[in-house]
C-alpha cells in the first residue's frame, strides 16, 4: 500500500535501483528495505514537485499510446541519467490517489539533481500539488521561470500576458480608505486622487459570507488584522499582475478586471507577510506560466512557519465563534 509505505519511510533515505522510466518524472524503482538484506520492494515513484509530459491512449481498437509533446524527449533525458543506476531515495509523501512522491540523489549528477535538470531543460513543469514537499522548491521555481522565458521545450508556445509587463511596472503611494476583507483593500491613489480596489498578490484570506451566508473560519480575524494596521494610513503599492475572472452566467455583464498588488508600509514592511505569519491567509499556488508577487518565496516560508506553529487557520482547535 503506497500510503502505508509513505507513512513508514517518509523522510528516510533508502537505497534503490531505477528499473524503468515511465515518463520523465515517473519511475519504477526497486527499493532496498532497511533490515531486509537482499530484499527489494517494487514501487512507482513520482518526482516530487515536478511533472513531465506523459502519454495518452487514443480511441482506436486496440488503443494506441500517443506521446504528448516532448514526452519522448523527457523520458529519454531521464533514462540517460538514471536507468539501471543505484540511487538514494527520500520519500516525501503520497497523495489521495496512492501516488508516491519523492526526491532522488545520484552522485554522478551532483551538485545538480534530476528534477532541476528536467525543469531547466523545459522538459518538466512544477507541480503545485507536491512542490511544497520538495526542499529545493525555490530553486525549481526559479529554474522554471528561466526555461519559460527562454521558451525551451514545453514552453515553446508560451505567450506572456500582454498586460503583465505594464501592470507589474506600476507603483504609487496612497492612503487606505477601506479594508473590504482579509485580502482586499481600497487605496486612494495620491497621484490621481482616485480610489483603487486592490487584491493582495499571491495571497488568499478566508472568505466573508455573502448575501447573509456564514463567514469562513478566521475571515473576520483576517479583515480585522488588516483594518488595525492599514485603515487611514499611507502605504506603498506595487502592482504585480491583473486577472479578469471568467463570466459566471450567460448574458451577464463582463466581469471587472481584478488588480493584484504588493502593499507595504512606507517603511517597507509587507502586510501580506504579517497576515501569513499570523495564520490568517494562505499562499496561492500559481501555475508556472502565471505572474506572482515579487516576494512569493518569502510568503511560502512565512506560511510554513505559521503552519508548523499551528497558528490561526492552521490550528487544530475549533475556530472562534462568529
Image (spheres, helix red, strand yellow):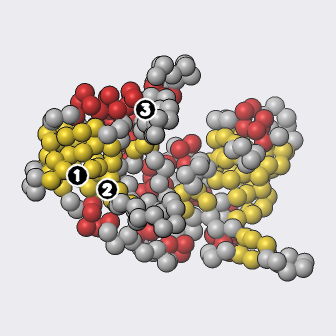
Residue 4 figure quarter: top right
> Which of 189/80 is in front?
189
Give the distance between the C-alpha atoms of the residues marked 2 and 1, in whole angstroms: 9 Å
- CB under 8 Å between callouts 2 and 1? yes
Quadrant placement of the N terminus: top right
Q: Secondary structure at mark 1?
A: strand
Residue denoted by label 2 = 259
**Residue 242 position (above or below residue 174):** below
**Residue 214 position (above or below residue 156):** above
Horizontal placement of 49 versus 43: left or right?
Answer: left
* Label 3 or label 1, whichever comes before in sequence order: 1
Residue denoted by label 3 = 219
Q: Residue at x 75, y 63 (%)?
A: 22
Say few, some or many: other residues with alpha carbon within 10 Å of mark 3 (under 14 / 14 to 19 / 20 or more).
Answer: many
Q: Residue at x 29, y 49 (%)?
A: 198
- Measured as percent of width and height from the top left, residue 5 is found at 77, 37
Residue denoted by label 1 = 196
Amino acid at each position: 500500500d503506497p500510503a502505508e509505505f509513505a507513512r513508514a519511510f517518509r523522510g528516510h533515505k533508502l537505497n534503490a535501483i531505477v528499473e524503468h522510466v515511465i515518463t520523465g518524472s515517473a519511475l519504477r524503482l526497486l527499493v532496498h528495505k532497511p533490515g531486509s538484506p537482499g530484499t527489494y520492494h517494487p514501487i512507482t515513484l513520482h518526482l516530487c514537485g515536478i511533472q513531465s509530459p506523459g502519454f495518452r491512449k487514443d480511441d482506436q481498437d486496440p488503443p494506441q499510446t500517443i506521446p504528448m509533446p516532448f514526452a519522448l524527449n523527457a523520458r529519454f533525458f531521464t533514462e540517460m541519467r538514471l536507468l539501471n543506476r543505484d540511487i538514494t531515495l527520500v520519500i516525501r509523501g503520497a497523495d489521495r490517489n496512492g501516488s508516491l512522491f519523492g526526491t532522488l540523489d545520484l552522485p554522478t549528477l551532483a551538485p545538480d539533481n534530476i528534477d532541476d535538470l528536467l525543469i531547466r531543460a523545459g522538459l518538466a513543469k512544477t507541480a503545485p500539488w507536491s512542490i511544497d514537499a520538495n526542499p529545493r522548491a525555490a530553486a525549481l521555481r526559479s529554474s522554471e521561470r528561466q526555461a519559460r522565458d527562454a521558451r525551451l521545450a514545453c514552453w515553446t508556445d508560451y505567450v506572456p500576458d500582454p498586460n503583465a509587463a505594464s501592470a507589474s511596472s506600476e507603483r504609487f503611494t496612497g492612503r487606505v480608505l477601506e479594508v473590504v476583507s482579509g485580502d482586499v483593500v481600497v487605496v486612494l491613489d495620491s497621484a490621481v486622487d482616485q480610489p483603487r480596489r486592490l487584491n493582495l498578490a499571491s495571497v488568499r484570506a478566508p472568505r466573508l459570507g455573502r448575501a447573509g451566508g456564514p463567514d469562513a473560519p478566521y475571515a473576520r480575524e483576517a479583515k480585522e488584522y488588516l483594518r488595525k494596521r492599514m485603515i487611514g494610513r499611507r502605504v506603498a503599492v506595487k502592482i504585480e499582475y491583473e486577472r479578469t475572472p471568467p463570466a459566471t452566467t450567460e448574458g451577464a455583464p463582463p466581469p471587472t478586471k481584478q488588480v493584484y498588488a504588493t502593499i507595504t508600509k512606507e517603511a517597507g514592511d509587507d502586510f501580506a507577510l504579517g497576515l501569513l505569519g499570523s495564520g490568517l491567509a494562505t499562499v496561492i499556488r500559481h501555475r508556472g506560466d502565471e505572474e506572482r508577487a515579487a516576494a512569493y518565496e518569502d510568503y511560502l516560508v512565512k506560511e510554513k512557519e505559521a503552519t508548523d506553529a499551528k497558528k490561526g487557520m492552521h490550528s487544530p482547535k475549533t475556530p472562534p465563534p462568529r
